[in-house]
Amino acid sequence: MAFRDELAAAVAEITAAAHDRLVSDRGGSVPFEVEREFRTDVSALFARWSPYGDGDADLVQGLVDAVAALARDHIETARSDVGRVSAVVEQWHGSAAAAFRRSFIGSYELAVAGQLIALRDLGRILAAYGAVMAAAQRTLLAIGQATVAALGDAVGGFEFTVPGSAADPLSGAALLFDPVSLGGPATPGRVDGDALHDVLASMDGAVTRLDEHVDAEEDLIRAVLDTAQARLDANLPYLLPADSGVGDDLDEFESRPGSHVVVEIAALYHAGNVDLTSAAGHYEQAWRGLDLGAVTEPAAFGPWFARTLFDYRTLRQTFSSQVLLATRDELMRHGDDLCGAALLYAEADGIDARQILQVLDTPGSPW
């Protein structure tokens, strides 16, 4: 059952129990004016409950999965593509080859390690939002059950499950923000009162406490977001592969006539035209995955976390545009460099493009 439906059922149950208590307190007869005032007061009380039903913790979890799994898988696949390029480049010799291995291949591995950490932390922040939402919704239903019990002259106790709910997804080692300590156990809540008005006032006070707890949890997430954004901004240069400079001056390639065979040149051309192009495509898919996930955010969050969601979106956008898309562009440019190198070698050895394409199109060719 969707939480909105659970909430509606809880409100209906409390309203019915409150009306029964009103009738009992009035000795079985309720004047019209009193009945109308009761309905007005109850509607006002439950107006505070409705925003809790406008968020969907399951949709938030879907966003977490998109960040933690989909985008990560695309980056890992791109990493495999670049690994194949690295194997080909190991067979390439000369000053340009050394520069390419040192500047691009080496820096790419370090960049990916940082990218995966940043992506993991984006997912952990989303998970913290989801944990707070789910815990607050459970607590609100518990307040409802305690209210019904109190209206029936029973003990109306409940547990606050919100405090510290954000800390678990945010705890642990991270490079983009400091670990967050788990919060202490929450103080048990209670709904009570000798009269109908007292019970409803007690219920309203419990909801006020719940609001305060959610605000405190959001403040915890805000502190993490501020740190994450500052550290992401500071580390952006290290989250991108370095520029090898190979493509700036192809004359630096050591192209000695007769030093290469067609198959070697075809392998280098394939690494640039296929493998690095494929890797670039996976970075674009990772970017699109985050971008499409953003479309779900309004339905997932509703009015929740209005004070900090802008900061989260800024963090996500920084990572999407300045890391994922920027890496895509670098991979495409380095792919062009490898293709240019291959064609330069071919020219030096008197090999034309048709010979390269013939090797690439040969059945059974590994390329």
Image (cartoon, rainbow, N blue to C red):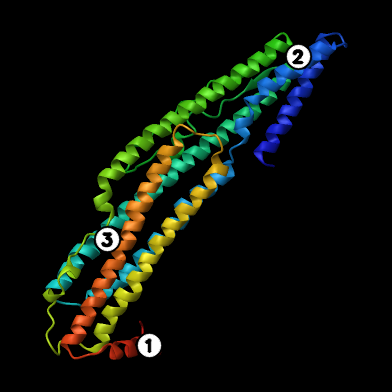
Task: Report which residue position mark 3 lands on.
Answer: 108
Instruction: Check the picture and name the quadrant holding the C terminus.
Output: bottom left
**In-front residue for pair 8/85:** 8
Give the answer, above or below, for where 142 lies relative to 121.
above
Q: Do the CB atoms of the residues marked 3 and 2 lie less than 8 Å apart?
A: no
Task: Report which residue position mark 2 lands on.
Answer: 37
**Image side of residue 134 versus residue 267, left or right:** right
Tell me the amino acid under the disc marked 3.
Tyr
Callout 1: SS: loop
Q: CA distance from mark 3 to mark 2?
A: 69 Å
Q: Nearer the viewer, mark 2 or mark 1?
A: 2
Q: Nearer the viewer, mark 1 or mark 3?
A: 1
- At a point 58% along the width and 38% down the height, the residue shown is 55
Tell me the amino acid under the disc marked 2.
Glu
Mark before the other along the chain sequence, 1 or 3: 3
Q: Which mark is residue 361?
A: 1
